[in-house]
Image: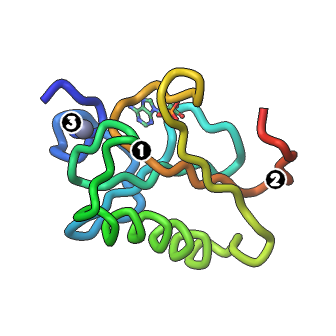
Amino acid sequence: MDCLFCKIINREIPADIVYEDDDVLAFNDIDPKAPIHMLVVPKKHIATLNDIEEGDLALVGRLQYTAAHLAKEQGFADDGYRVVMNCNDQGGQTVYHIHMHLMGGRRFTWPAG
Ligand code: AMP
Ligand code: ZN
């Protein structure tokens, strides 16, 4: 499949992987928008948030759980962090394999731009 994140999952292209289990992979964003910026992705290819099906609910929960686990493990959970999932063009999605941005290490503004 011609999907950047599937290629990272399948080790066809390299990434700076920080976490892996049977269902989820996390790696550092190649163009970080914060001192800490990781992407948490399901190994199953799901193109957008609109394509999540009922059978994927536990998997989507694992993305959030993994993000919190990484924030705790890396010591920025108590300071706080931002998680973002962009959907489709107006939402700012550029890679069509769902992913949770996990960003930390600075203060974030609200509302997001
Ligand atoms: P989005 O715009 O929400 O779809 O996010 C896609 C993210 O993937 C962006 O933050 C990019 O910097 C990041 N990205 C693109 N290519 C790579 C790559 N090869 N390795 C790691 N992150 C990437
Ligand atoms: Zn994919």
Residue 86 drawn above or below residue 56: above
- Seen at 78% across and 40% down, the residue is 112
Q: Residues within 10 Å of mark 3 (few under 14, many from 20)?
A: some
Q: Which residue is mark 3?
A: 7
Dot 3 lies on which element?
A: helix
Q: What's the distance in space between the residues labelled 2 and 1, CA to CA?
A: 27 Å
Residue 38 in percent (x, y) is at 53, 51
Disc number at residue 49? 1
Q: Please rate how many residues cluster around mark 2, counting C-alpha atoms within 10 Å: few if below 14, some from 14 to 19, many from 20.
A: some
In the image, which disc is placed on residue 109? Answer: none
The label nearer to you, 1 versus 3, is 1
Q: Is residue 5 above or below residue 102?
A: above
Q: Which residue is mark 2?
A: 106
Q: In front: mark 2 or mark 1?
A: 1
Q: Residue at x 61, y 78 (%)?
A: 72
Amino acid bearing label 1: Leu
Identify the mark nearer the N-term, 1 or 3. 3
Q: Secondary structure at mark 2?
A: loop
Queried on whether the Cβ of the residue with tag 3 lies below 8 angstroms from ligand 2, the answer reads yes
Residue 98: x, y in percent? 38, 44
- Between 32 and 108, the one lying in front of the other is 108
Q: Amino acid at mark 3?
A: Lys
Q: Nearer the viewer, residue 57 or 41?
A: 57
Picture coordinates of residue 67, whole percent (x, y) = 52, 66
